[in-house]
Structure formats: C-alpha cells, structure tokens
C-alpha cells in the first residue's frame, strides 16, 4: 500500500508556532492548554537554571521553563508569552518570545533531523517542517523536561520492582522516534522478560516491515503486538494503528499506544481506531502489566 499520498484526518497535525531568537519553533496543539501574556514570576531557590519561576493562574501553581535558556540560546527577557501545556500527566508552562500562529500540516510532512542540521535540531526536536520559505523546528518537549527533571523521564526503576521473570518469546514491535526512549523501552521490556523485540523509529518504517512480513507469510513469527508512540515523523501512531486494524491479514495484531499525549481527545481517537491498550508515559512498569494481561502472560 502506498502511504505517501494518503489523505486522512488521522495524520493531520496542527502546530502552535512561536519564535525564539528569530527562529520558528512548534508544539503540537494537542499539548497546549492555554496561552498567557507574560507576568512576573516567583523565583524558586536552587532550581535548575532553565526553571524561571512559578506563578498561580486561577490558583494552580505552575512551573515556568525559560525555553530560550533550555535551548541554550540565552535568557529570556521579562516579556512575551507563557504556553501552558499538559503531557506526561504534567502541567507546565514554557516562556517564549512571540506567538506566530497555527500551522496545519501532516505527520507525513515532518522531516527527521540529522547531524547536518546542527546539534539543537538533532538532539531536542521531534522533526522539522517547511512553512513556505521558513523551517519550523518541532521541539521534543518531553526530552527538554526530562533533562531539567530526570524524575519525569521513563521510570525504568519500576522494572526492578517486578523481580525475576521468565523469558517471554512473544514477538513485539516497538515504534518510537526518540533514540533514547526507544532504547530504554527495549531495555526495560527485555529486563521484564520480553526479549523477542524489533524496534523502528517511526510508523512508516514499522508499516513497511509489517507489510513485508505479511506478504512473506511470516507475520506471526515477527510480530503479535505493536507498541507505538503517537508523535512521530513520516507516520504517526494513529495512522499506523489505522493501517494495522484495517489491513487484510494485519488486523489481528494487538496495538498498544504508549505516549505522553494520552488525554480525552487522543484516547477517544485511539478507541475509535481499535487500539487495544493506551498507556501514558512514563509508566513503563504499568506497561509491562498491561502487556501481560493483553497477551495472556503469567509472571511466574
């Protein structure tokens, strides 16, 4: 199946575009709760240099990240906007210099950065998308936050609490564009006994493998369950799920969405597409438990 020219609401992406140091950056609108004009903050003693302070809109205490400082572009001046967000079950705000507007695009149009684009684009972004003559850098907010507070990252220590488990040979395909998270998920699942793992960097790569195995008649040997992120360049997790669940010979595969973006809207979309389990990062220990139930595995 040619997925390059597919037009589908599943792959639609709206980015809130903002500017820092003259450069354009983007965040998935699904992560944004509100935009607030800059207001004075209360500093936090001994906080990370990128933590600018806290404020309390409507009585809720929110930590504000100086995004300019987090991107190593200098320190923000006391003006601009706060972007209030929710992901990984966290409410946080990011201080930016200027809000430009909404850019509508598709996950298929998101280009994966590489070493030629520079260290910022390679290390702290989900991808890059063209907007006319401009380039919008889609930031990896999960990585930015985890570098500031490692406790918000994948809770790999929870795997140790599971104790010694037997080897489980059920083939699983892990789909995650973050190099670090991809490695940590694979290592955590392996430690929990799920050792028959294949992993790819986005939905397009995963679907091409699934199609290949199906056409070869070896699908069951290579994959029975797919664990996928939502936000990924080339093809996101929702489009991958749609192709799997509607595909001839692939719809029997179990699909688990493991993402920072599990909210009411994305959960409904996942349910409508036939996702079997939806889990919020960073609860890798709970993911193992859900896998056990989904695949009929006993821990002893």
Image: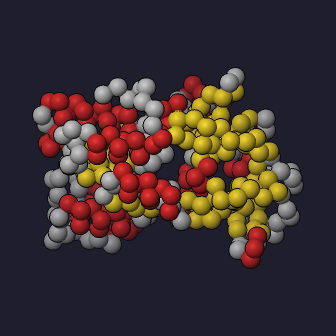
Where residue 82 appears, as percent x and y from the top left, is 76, 56
Q: How far across and down, in percent of the image, does residue 102 sit?
A: 68, 42
- Which residue sits at x=28%, y=42%? 246
> Could you say which quadrant of the image residue 165 lies in?
bottom left
Task: Identify which residue is drawn at 29% across, 71% down.
Answer: 162
As drawn, the residue found furthest toward the bottom would be: 59
Tell me what residue is drawn at x 14 percent, y 44 percent.
220
Q: Does residue 166 sit above or below 183 in this rendering?
A: below
Residue 123 visible: no
Instruction: Examine the rendered structure and indicate whether residue 19 appears above or below residue 279.
Output: above
- Residue 36 percent location from the top left of the image: 78, 58
Quadrant of residue 8 within the rendered picture: top left
**Where residue 216 sits in the image (x, y, percent)?**
14, 30
Q: Left or right: where does residue 287 sit relative to residue 50?
A: left
Q: Is residue 13 left or right of residue 239?
A: right
Up the image or down, 19 lies above or below 273; here it is above
The answer to whether residue 135 is visible is yes
The quadrant of the image that shows the C terminus is bottom left
Q: Nearer the viewer, residue 80 or 3?
A: 3
Quadrant of the drawing holding the N terminus? top left
Q: Which quadrant would residue 147 be assigned to in this image?
A: bottom right
- Which one is in front, 216 or 13? 13
């Amino acid at each position: 199946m040619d997925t390059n020219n597919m037009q589908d609401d599943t792959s639609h992406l709206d980015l809130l575009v903002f500017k820092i140091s003259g450069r354009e950056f983007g965040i998935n609108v699904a992560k944004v709760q509100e935009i607030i004009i800059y207001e004075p903050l209360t500093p936090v003693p001994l906080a990370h240099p990128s933590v600018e302070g806290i404020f309390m809109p409507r009585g809720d205490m929110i930590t504000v990240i100086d995004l300019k400082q987090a991107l190593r572009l200098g320190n923000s001046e006391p003006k601009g906007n706060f972007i209030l967000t929710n992901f990984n079950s966290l409410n946080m705000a990011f201080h930016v210099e200027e809000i430009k507007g909404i850019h509508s695009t598709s996950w298929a149009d998101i280009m994966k950065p590489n070493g030629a684009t520079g260290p910022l684009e390679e290390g702290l972004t989900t991808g890059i998308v063209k907007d006319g003559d401009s380039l919008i850098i889609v930031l990896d907010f999960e990585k930015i936050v985890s570098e500031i507070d490692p406790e918000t990252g994948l809770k790999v220590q929870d795997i140790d609490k599971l104790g010694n488990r037997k080897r489980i040979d059920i083939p699983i395909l892990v789909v995650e564009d973050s190099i670090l998270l991809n490695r940590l998920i694979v290592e955590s699942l392996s430690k929990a006994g799920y050792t028959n793992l294949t992993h790819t960097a986005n939905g397009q790569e995963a679907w091409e493998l699934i199609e290949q195995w199906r056409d070869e008649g070896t699908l069951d040997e290579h994959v029975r369950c797919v664990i996928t992120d939502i936000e990924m360049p080339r093809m996101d997790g929702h489009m991958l799920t749609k192709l799997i669940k509607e595909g001839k010979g692939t719809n029997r595969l179990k699909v688990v969405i493991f993402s920072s973006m599990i909210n009411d809207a994305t959960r409904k979309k996942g349910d409508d597409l036939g996702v079997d389990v939806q889990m919020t990062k960073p609860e890798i220990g709970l993911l193992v438990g859900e896998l056990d139930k989904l695949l009929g595995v006993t821990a002893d």
